[in-house]
Amino acid sequence: WKPPAYASGGAPTKGEDGSASGLIEVMGNQVALHAVFDGHGGAGAAQLCAQEMAQWIQDAAGEVVRSDPHAVMEDVLSQACRDAFDTANEAICDAFPSAGTTATVALIFAEGMVVANVGDSSACLVVPGQGKLTTVTDDHRVDRLSDEERQRVLHCGGILSQATGQSGQAV
């Protein structure tokens, strides 16, 4: 099995974006990691995640496997993403209290793929030869936040507001 290459969208427009691509090892297998981060309130949070997310996921996956040696790869990677996103949140709150980032991570392994996201950066899957585009993430948007998530964001010093486009319309 050869890890796949990837393509990402155009150049960042605000200078607050980050991305990461590489291989991590989980349960003795190579896993291709491709991630994008859309920073808000400066580039620091997105750049931090771009630099550290692969290690955070690999470390979290190791912890999951140690706690459940019989776990299957998909479950290990799913939990590792949740744990790594928690680690990222703590690191961002400490280092950049007035900034944040979305995170969309695709982990591709021999038997499948796990996609995880936080925020409103979507991931889409294109099936070669079919020309069919399928969105594989659910955006997390201000207008859909639970009370618990709203409180978490505010506790970190975040500000919740609806983004507007150039015309002033909500986006």
Image: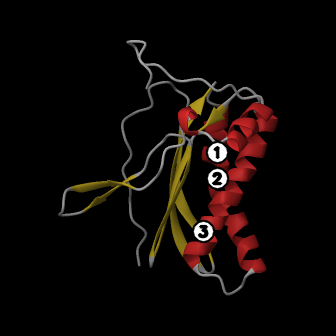
Q: Between residue 146 and residue 87, name the one nearer to us.
A: 146
Q: Badge 2: how crowded within 10 Å, few (<14), some, or many (20+)?
A: many
| Residue, disc 2 | 53
- Of all residues, the one furthest to the front in this rendering is 147
Q: Which mark is residue 49?
A: 1
Tag 3's secondary structure? Answer: helix
Q: Quadrant of the N terminus?
A: bottom left
- For the residue marked with disc 1, what is the amino acid? Cys
| In this rendering, position of residue 39 left or right of residue 44 | left
State the separation of the CA atoms marked 2 and 3: 13 Å
**Dot 1 or dot 3, earlier in sequence:** 1
Q: Where is residue 49 in the image (x, y as percent from the top left)?
A: 64, 45
Q: In this view, does 66 lie above or below 120?
A: below
| In this rendering, position of residue 87 left or right of residue 118 | right
Q: Of the residues tagged 1 and 3, which is closer to the observer?
A: 3
| Residue at 61% across, 30% down | 43
- Colour basis: secondary structure
| Residue at 64% across, 27% down | 160
| Residue at 73% across, 26% down | 98
- For the residue marked with disc 3, what is the amino acid? Leu
| Residue at 50% across, 40% down | 120
Q: Are marks 1 and 2 in contact (CB under 8 Å)?
A: yes
Tag 2's secondary structure? Answer: helix
State the separation of the CA atoms marked 1 and 3: 17 Å
Q: Which mark is residue 77?
A: 3
